[in-house]
């Protein structure tokens, strides 16, 4: 599973980093700091994605590349 943050939408609230610091780093806007979301942090990463107030975190599907 791969995630990315749409930096045009992100408001830098920091919620994703608070929920899943292994995956998200917020410095102005959020960034995904891992290439692939590991099974260990996947549930937290999904919680962060669903908890983003502006839905800036999106899953990157392989076929969309
Ligand atoms: S929760 Fe959403 S809006 Fe907030 S910093 Fe993370 S990606 Fe940006």
Image (cartoon, rainbow, N blue to C red):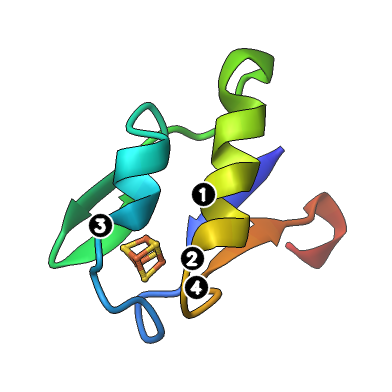
Rendered view: 29 above or below 40: below
Secondary element under disc 1, as helix, strand or loop, is helix
- The residue indicated by pointer 2 is 52
| Rendering quadrant holding ligand 1 | bottom left
**Label 1 within 8 A of ligand 1 by Cβ:** yes
Mark 4 residue element: loop
Q: Residues within 10 Å of mark 3 (few under 14, many from 20)?
A: some
Q: Quadrant of residue 12?
A: bottom left
The tag earlier along the polypeptide, 1 or 3, is 3
**Contact, mark 2 vs mark 1 (Cβ under 8 Å):** yes
Find out if the beta carbon at label 3 lies less than 8 Å from the nearest ligand 1 atom.
Answer: yes
Q: Is mark 2 within 8 Å of ligand 1?
A: yes
Q: Residue at label 4?
A: 56
* Residue under the image location 86 percent in, 58 percent down: 63
Residue 42 vertical position relative to residue 45 in the rendered view, above or below:
above
Q: Given contact means CB atoms under 8 Å apart, are the residues at marks 4 and 1 in contact?
A: no
Ligand 1 lies under 8 Å from the Cβ of mark 4: yes
Q: Classify 10 Å Cα crowding around label 2: few (below 14), some (14-19), many (20 and above).
A: some
CB within 8 Å, label 2 to label 4: yes
Taking 1 as reference, is 17 left or right? left
The mark that comes first in sequence, 4 or 1, is 1
Q: CA distance from mark 1 to mark 3?
A: 10 Å
Q: Earlier in the sequence, mark 4 or mark 3?
A: 3
Residue denoted by label 3? 14
Label 1 sits on residue = 48
């Amino acid at each position: 599973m791969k995630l990315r943050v749409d930096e045009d939408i992100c408001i830098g609230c920091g919620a994703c980093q608070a929920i899943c610091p292994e995956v998200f780093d917020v410095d102005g806007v959020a960034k995904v700091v891992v290439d692939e979301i590991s099974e260990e942090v996947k549930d937290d990463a999904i919680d962060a994605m669903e908890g983003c107030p502006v839905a800036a975190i999106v899953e990157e599907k392989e076929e969309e590349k």
